[in-house]
């Protein structure tokens, strides 16, 4: 990735890039659940879990993996409550989480870089869909 020299600063203070004020939450059974911000390691762990979805065709295992990933981002939600969601609700919650935890931005950057390189995605970015 090439950066052009514009009016960008020569110093980046990562300590100032904190999004604690950006509360992201969802409500289930009358209780709000706040999303915790994912670290790079969380992103890697969740991506690994999600890449294995569909490999062995075990629907129960796939659903439990999705619930585990959601639970890692919303630690106050009860796992049993997640298991009682309708599939449309679970899918909506997963997409909501991806949009707000930075995962979608990373996926978009991977796809953009692949397009610029004249390659089709290798499926890794799509594996988290």
Image (cartoon, rainbow, N blue to C red):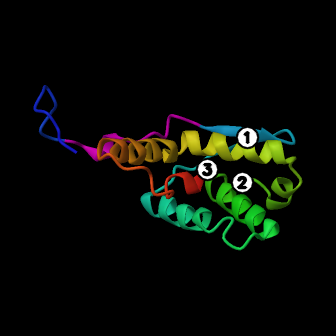
In this view, the residue farthest toward the top is 7
Looking at the picture, how far across and down is residue 101, in whole percent? 53, 45
- State left or right for residue 107 relative to residue 91: left
Q: Residues within 10 Å of mark 3 (few under 14, many from 20)?
A: some
**Residue at numbered disc 1:** 92
Looking at the picture, how far across and down is residue 93, in whole percent? 71, 43
Q: CA distance from mark 1 to mark 2?
A: 18 Å
Query: How would you classify the magenta stretch by its main secondary structure?
Result: loop
The residue that appears at 65% across and 42% down in the rendered structure is 95
Q: For the magenta stretch, what is the residue range?
A: 12-23
Q: Residues within 10 Å of mark 2 (few under 14, many from 20)?
A: some
Closer to the eye: label 1 or 2: 1
Q: Quadrant of residue 25?
A: top right
Vertical position of residue 93 compared to residue 48: above or below: above
Tag 3 and tag 2, C-beta contact below 8 Å: no
Closer to the eye: label 3 or 2: 3
Q: CA distance from mark 3 to mark 1?
A: 11 Å
The residue that appears at 81% across and 42% down in the rendered structure is 88
**Residue at numbered disc 2:** 76
């Amino acid at each position: 990735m090439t950066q052009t020299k514009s009016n960008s600063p020569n110093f980046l203070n990562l300590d100032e890039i904190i999004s604690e004020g950006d509360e992201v939450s969802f409500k289930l059974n009358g209780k709000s659940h706040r999303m915790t911000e994912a670290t790079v390691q969380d992103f890697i762990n969740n991506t690994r879990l999600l890449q294995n979805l569909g490999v062995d065709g075990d629907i129960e295992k796939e659903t439990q993996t999705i619930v585990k990933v959601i639970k890692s981002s919303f630690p106050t939600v009860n796992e049993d409550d997640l298991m009682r969601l309708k599939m449309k609700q679970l899918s909506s919650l997963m997409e909501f989480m991806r949009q707000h935890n930075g995962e979608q931005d990373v996926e978009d950057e991977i796809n953009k870089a692949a397009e610029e390189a004249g390659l089709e995605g290798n499926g890794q970015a799509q594996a988290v869909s």
